[in-house]
Amino acid sequence: GTPNWSQRPDLAADDPIDAENIMYSLHFYSGTHMSSEDTTDRGNVMSNGRYALENGVAIFATEWGTSEANGTGGPYLDKADQWLDFLNSNNVSWCNWSLTNKNETSGAFTPYIMGVSEATVLDPGDDRIWTAEEMSVTGEYVRARIKGIKYEPIDRKLEGAFEEVLWTFDDGTTQGFELNRDSPVKSVTLENRKNVLWLTGMKSSNDTSDTEFWNNVRISSEGYSPDFDIFGGDTVKMDIYVEEPTTISISSVPQSDSHGWTNPKNALRILPREFTDQGNGLYMAKAVLMIGQATNIQEIASDADGSVLTNIVLFVGSENGGDVGIDNITFSGSGASGLPPLEHQIKGDPKLPSDFDDFTRQGWDWNTDSGTKVSIKVEAANRSLALCYEFAYPEIKPTDNWASAPRLDLWIEPLTRNNYDYVVFDLYLKPTKATTGEMAISCAFQPPEIGYWVQIPESYNIDFTKLSEAELTEDGLYHFLVTLDFAAIESITEDTPLRNMILIFGDIESDFAGKVYMDNVQFLTQEELDALSAPEVSATPAPTEQPTPSPETEVTPSTPSKDNSLIEAAVLIVAGVLLMAAGIVYALRKKKNAPKSTGEVEGENIESAEDERDLASEEGEIQKQPDQTEKKSED
């Protein structure tokens, strides 16, 4: 191995081990580590490999993948070709990561994705062959490269699926893009630089929140009609370039002659960590706009007579006010058999503790490796707002019980353990089916200093065969106080930067289907957990201490003192007041039981109907704005 995740074989070349038959490890991911002909660039992994070879040491690419180094994006097959050509030309052997059916770009087998695909069984059967359909795009590609044959991928598109790049900017122009006449920011200029559309002068267009994109510059391509039919479309993609990683906000309004405008629900936020160094002074990230950020595409794509795209309006914000480049604006559709697009609640700003009282997801999203990715909502649960999603574990189980597990992810800075002992949250279940197996809830963190993975050793398991024994709330939900032993992670200190937290809802041979609600996600000390878990006890007066009578006091009763006389008088007064109250209650009950007039019956029915509406609003999805949300009650 070599330093920096085995990316520095050049250091081994400068100070090799004094022994025979030594090879040094090299790792790369084609979406992050660019190719290079140079041997002096110590920030480039291929350059480090070339330097090692030129200086007489042997290297072995013991791990490489088609994704980015963080496991997302891609597969970047063209860039993988450049790497494999370099390795082959220098007789360097390699091992690919990885032979798995997990939902990872670099995984070789088809993963379980709820409603889309079942996980490939890792036992190939008696013929010892996996079909191309059982392989992922990465697996199909890597198998071809291992065999030394031409990569000829099968057609994986569903019926009606399409993907078309409609603005490439390869002609050196802005392809019709200009400031929209209604743009609130007028200082931005547009130009084509090296076949990329660049927006400069962005200092006044710097709002990167989910919902205030209206304050940003607005550009449109009214002078250039793509004239392309996007019927069945559901996604807008584009490459975003910056000179320095920062948060970028993007939302859009695709337009046709029949459907001119529908407000976007929210903006897509691209965070600094999502940009990758392109090796030319620029950083690039992929922007994928779904229905929420390109709402009008739903109107256009569902109208067979009005689905020809004629224009697009973009709202762009740059947190640091730096220039923003846009390229390869692409429209795509998953096809007639594809899943409906996800409709998430607004993501909001990351927050811990997470109570969801502001009617946002407070930063929670699906982890890249989540086998379940459904719409995440914020709905009412136990008279509070909670994160909510609905899903079902598959009948045919993947070999890895995490492959089908929903994985929720929260990135927040700073994130450390401090002096806390537990990760705790309220979990509510509303099953349509849950008779067998268990849900195993685990918690992990990805600290860069400790290999990007530490996990709380013990999971919190819910046995569905004993579901009837669980606490039931007023609104018919099963409640669990999930408690995970944070302090049991021995490899972290109180101040280790943890970066992000992942909650995994694993499947142990379960048939669960239904809704899951999560609320009050927090870190607690042992004392705080004890206080939270303690049963509520009604206050009762302390017992009056009675002295043991002595023989003298038994023979000679004591005379009440002046103080005792006052106490007795007070007791008599209180008793009298209670008798009066009882009389009033009796009279009211007698009146209530008497026959009512028509008007009284109607009035009571109206009041009852209002009560039913109030109850329904509490049990159903709350439709209030954040400032109208009721204050969350404490446990």
Image: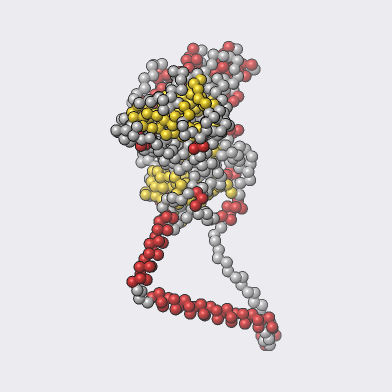
Which residue is painted at 62% across and 82% down in the image? 569
User: Which one is in front, 493 or 129?
Assistant: 493
Q: Quick check: 24 left or right of 329?
A: right
**How was this image coloured?**
secondary structure
The x, y position of residue 409, in whole percent, is 50, 39
Residue 628 lies, in percent from the top left, at 49, 52
In-image side of 444 versus 288 (left or right): right
Above or below, 383 against 20 in this view is below
Compared across the picture, whether 391 is left or right of 495 comes to left
* Direction bottom: furthest residue: 556
To which quarter of the image does residue 203 belong? top right
Asked if residue 97 can be seen in this view, the reply is: no
Depth check: give the residue in front, 564 or 266. 266
Q: Quadrant of residue 549?
A: bottom right
* Residue sitting at the far front: 181
Image quadrant assignment for residue 553: bottom right
Rendered-image quadrant of the N terminus: top right
In this rendering, the answer to whether 340 lies above or below 431 is above
Q: Residue at x 51, y 77 (%)?
A: 581
Q: Residue at 38% across / 16% down in the picture?
A: 150
Judge whether residue 473 can be spotted in this image: yes
Name the one closer to the observer, 549 or 29: 29
Residue 73 image point, x, y percent: 47, 28
Q: How many marks?
A: 0
Percent x, y of residue 435: 38, 49
Above/below status of 14 relative to 513: above
Q: What residue appears at the point 55 percent right and 65 percent down from the top-left corner? A: 538
